[in-house]
Image: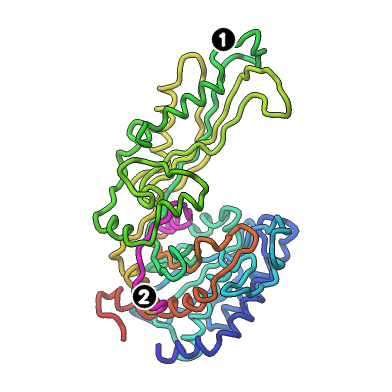
Amino acid sequence: MEKVLPYIEANKERYLKELKEFLAIPSISSQKDHDGDMMKCAQWAADQMRTIGMESVQILPTGGHPLVYGNWLHSPGDPTVLFYGHYDVQPVDPLNLWTSPPFEATIRGENLYARGSADDKGQVFIHFKAIEAYMKQVGSLPVNIKLLIEGEEEVGSVNLDRFVKEHKEMLKADLVVISDSGMYAKGVPSICYSLRGLSYMEVEVTGPNRDLHSGSFGGSVHNPVQALCELIASLHDKNGKVTVNGFYDAVRPLTKAERVSFKKLPFSDKKYAKELGVKQLYGEKGFTTLERVWARPTLECNGIWGGYTGEGAKTVLPAKAFAKISMRLVPDQTSAEVAKLFEKHFRKIAPKTVDVKVRMLHGGEAAITPIDSPGVKAAVAALEKGFGKKPLYQREGGSIPIVVQFKNILGLDTVLLGFGLPDENAHSPDEFINLDNFFGGIRTSAYFYNELPSFWKGGHKRK
């Protein structure tokens, strides 16, 4: 590290120049007009891999946008890291809300603004530069590494599962590292070790065989909109607990150590409510807000519709009503089982005055990496050295489906070593990456690769 750290410090300006080149490519995976830019961006990533010393660099075709792969495998006896990231970005609309052009990276104050700066080009580039520092100054890496950068994350990674299943040997490793997440707050380094899963449902409630005149028929049949609202309202009790039978049976409880760790985070219910514009928070009784958001399962109505919703009045009693309902899941729950429990419960509580249909639209599993695992321990040590203070532990309320797929297909746990911030505007105008986090991320990534072998072997930290 005595050679690596000065190199990182001496090349900061060049790093920013190169990152701006990467960010200038409008690699919007969801828009056909940018297919050429997607290939250009894949080529840029491949060229960068070769420049930093990676071998076997390939642009690999898929049914959609290509993957970029490279490796360095000359550290026998040390662990092999599979680093995953993505080079595609979200659309930039509405363009008029950007302070500076989305593909002209601009520094304002402490931040660099551009589409992809945080999600995920900037964080991929962090690892490129950490690897480069080793290869240029030491001539080798402390670990074996495989880089897999995809171009379809923002459109659901539609071809990634198949690729991973068909290339198990190529992707064989000891653990996965992903930097596509964030820290708890600026100046608060943290390690995310768990993600929630999802069961996403659609329900349909049918009453009469056609829309009816509410004056002529109102009071004689159960309005499907009313019935649906009554059903949804019954899915929580007065304490905010989900009433679906068996919903909590498989939930892995938080440990005492986790609850203590969450309390150390600088979180205020009052500030949180004010930022969201609500007078009072709501949720399952007996748990803190962070526990409810990160480590407890939830059930939410994401959308509801039926009847007449256009301009003016139309006195109709609708024949049907619909709702989208999502359930965020925690470790040990499975999306298929929870979907079955929900359907069984919803059918059971439906009144005889209406018919109901329940469809599962999609699902994904929760993921957790033990905090005492070698990868997480190495990440914690690296964050402390990279940012100068001990990191805290956090979970994430959302989902990253590929984390579960890496576990199911390759048998690998994932270390989420993210350097974004909660207000980074990912997917929104004026997306940014904080420069302190960017350079701290490069130092931390370098420390991580240096720390990992000793933790993996159960030895002492490297000096």
Residue at 46 percent of width and 14 percent of height: 352
Distance from the alpha carbon under mark 1 to that under mark 2: 66 Å
From the top left corner, tell me how far across and down residue 433 is, in percent: 56, 69
Q: For residue 216, which quarter of the picture? A: top right
Q: Is residue 276 above or below residue 191?
A: above
Q: Residue furthest right?
A: 33
Kind of residue at disc 1:
Gly
Q: Which residues are magenta?
A: 386-409
- Label 2: how many Cα within 10 Å (few below 14, some 14–19, many 20+): some
Q: Which residue is mark 2?
A: 389
Kind of residue at disc 2:
Lys
Q: Taking 328 as reference, is 49 left or right?
A: right
Q: Which residue is mark 1?
A: 219
Q: Secondary structure at mark 2?
A: loop
- Label 1: how many Cα within 10 Å (few below 14, some 14–19, many 20+): few
In the image, residue 403 lies in the stretch drawn in magenta: yes
Q: Taking 278 as reference, is 316 left or right?
A: right
From the top left corner, tell me how far across and down residue 161 is, in percent: 51, 55
Residue at 45 percent of width and 54 percent of height: 271
From the viewer's side, name the closer residue of 401 and 421.
Answer: 421
From the top left corner, tell me how far across and down residue 154 is, in percent: 59, 57
Q: Where's the N terminus, which quadrant?
A: bottom left
Q: Taking 38 as reference, is 242 left or right?
A: left
Q: Secondary structure at mark 1?
A: loop
